[in-house]
Image (spheres, rainbow, N blue to C red):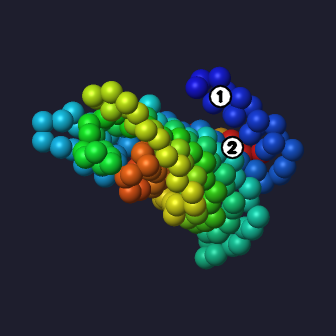
Amino acid sequence: TTLAIAASITALSISASAHADTTIGAAWAVRTNSDLNCAVGGACERASKSSGKIYEAYNFSVTPYNGFSITQSVEGMLYRIGDTKASFNTKSGVKNGNGRSSGAGIFYKVDLGTDEFGVVARIGSNFSRGSVDYVGGGSDSDKSWFAPAGGLGVRYNLNKNWTLTADWDRLPTKYNSTASKSKNDMYSLGVAYKF
């Protein structure tokens, strides 16, 4: 997993360096909550650990507005949602297990702010692959295509290149073949670099 993330960051850096008005970033989730259910007596830890994201954004429009600027971008994201202990609906009933997911998203992003500070909104869709290992044995997985996704955030520019970020992202996923989509809310802190 670490090698895959490093390779992805390297690929994003090479791609971004060839284009002006491009930003790459990475963020570590301080908390990730899901709306999965927990059966009575079952293990329950819906706040996932080891979650995070990397992304690349291309700014295609900057418009001045009352002393601020509105920046429009297209953003691609790769992310991982760490282990979640909860109860999952299966064909044979409710089972306890450990779920996790990873995926990719494409977003339209708007930034309203100044050269120093800004607020960000993104809306788009994601592809995800979720899996679950059941406590009593066995496992299952499923894919979710074109699920609505989005988020909000703030940024603080340290200089013309480096930025600190704080984001909330809603990233739906399906953990098994019989369950409906689950909502994952990822709250993250990160850093971004503008070329």
Find residue 170 and name its label: none
Quadrant of the frame with the N terminus: top right
In this view, the residue in front, 47 or 131, is 131
Q: CA distance from mark 1 to mark 2?
A: 16 Å
In this view, the residue in front, 131 or 166, is 131
The answer to which of marks 1 and 2 sits earlier in the sequence is: 1
| Residue 113 on image: x %, y % | 58, 63
The quarter of the picture where residue 6 lies is top right
In this view, the residue in front, 107 or 91, is 91
Residue at x 33%, y 27% (from the top left corner)? 137
Left or right for 4, reference 20: left
Q: Is residue 49 visible?
A: no
* Amino acid at circle 2: Ile
Q: Which element carries disc 1, helix, strand or loop?
A: helix
Residue at x 64%, y 57% (from the top left corner)? 106
Residue at the top extreme?
3
Q: Which residue is mark 2?
A: 24
The quarter of the picture where residue 47 lies is top left
* Amino acid at circle 1: Ala
Residue at x 58%, y 52% (from the top left corner)? 127
Q: Which residue is mark 1?
A: 4
Q: Which element carries disc 2, helix, strand or loop?
A: strand
Is the residue 142 above or below the residue 106 in the image? Answer: above
Residue at the right extreme?
18
| Residue 139 on image: x %, y % | 40, 33
Q: Residues within 10 Å of mark 1 (few under 14, many from 20)?
A: few
